[in-house]
Image (spheres, rainbow, N blue to C red):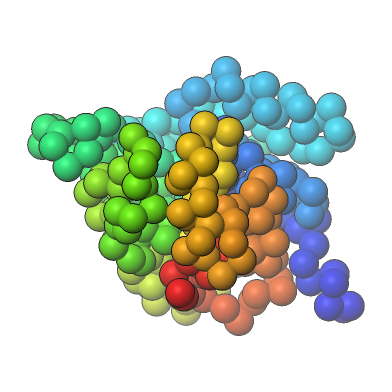
Amino acid sequence: MNVLETFSLKGKVALVTGGAGLYGRQIVRALTEAGADTYIASRDLKALKIIAGEYRARDLDVTALQYDQGDEQSILALRDDILRNNGRLDILVNNSVARPMKRGYADEAAAFEESMHINATGLFLITRAFGDAMAERQHGSIINIASIQGMIAPDPTIYRGTNMSGWYPDYFFHKGGMINFTRFLASYYGARNVRCNSVSPGGYRTKQHPAAFVKQYSDRTFLGRLANDSDLMGAIVFLASDASLYITGVNIPVDGGYTAK
């Protein structure tokens, strides 16, 4: 097989949770353009159906489904639906995230608990549900969308002169946990030929970002900029495809050198 052919996802079935967000959209685009039949799932089915329709208009196979990562029965119903329709799942991208701590470090304990219920317990449950199904077939790739904020501490200097801050303890807690959970999964499923890796994106530039933040953040990277709407795509296709068959338990920062500086 030609090396470029190993990057193809033709004939693969993929699930992306939370596919309507900034990074979710380019993850879905990457998988579908590489050839995968892709499911996107979240609580907001209306938003996902709009996205799925845009892809189907381009003759790309994207199907929207609803599920709640805070509800185990909803997770199991999602698994059963996909397996019933396809007989398998080849690629799971855990991209869904809840951000209930609107007041950051000063928020109530209940907000932290809600975040852990969805982002930690829910992550465990959906990964086990689909990971075990992959293990039965002895084939699959799990990709966890972590964050550079799971690798390093907040840097308050990048927020100077803005109303922004990085004091969201739940996000740092569960993204850091996700990276090590990735290693656990790589070990647990490795003997059954299921790989698990994580990707840690850096900051994604939006029109809402103040100029001061854009400059200060960009200055902290080697490449001198925030991420754009395609920077994550190559890493996703690589980890989902047979091009990375001997790679598992790895966390890849996609951050322009932010964490290396």
Look at the picture and state if 106 lies above or below 139: above
Between 89 and 261, the one lying in front of the other is 261
The spot of residue 206 in percent (x, y) is 56, 38
The quadrant holding residue 147 is bottom left
Q: Is residue 182 visible?
A: yes
The quadrant of the image that shows the C terminus is bottom left
The quadrant holding residue 175 is bottom left
Between 214 and 95, the one lying in front of the other is 214
The spot of residue 136 in percent (x, y) is 51, 63
Residue at image position (60%, 81%) is: 246
Residue at image position (25%, 46%) is: 167
The quadrant of the image that shows the N terminus is bottom right
Q: Is residue 83 visible?
A: no
Between 209 and 150, the one lying in front of the other is 209
Query: Number of marks in the image?
Result: 0
Q: Is residue 241 left or right of residue 122?
A: right
Residue extending furthest toward the bottom: 246
Q: Is residue 148 left or right of residue 239?
A: left
Residue extending furthest toward the top: 46
The spot of residue 164 in percent (x, y) is 35, 39
The spot of residue 30 in percent (x, y) is 71, 51
Look at the picture and state if 77 lies above or below 1: above
The quadrant holding residue 163 is top left
Q: Is residue 199 left or right of residue 84?
A: left
Residue at image position (47%, 64%) is: 220
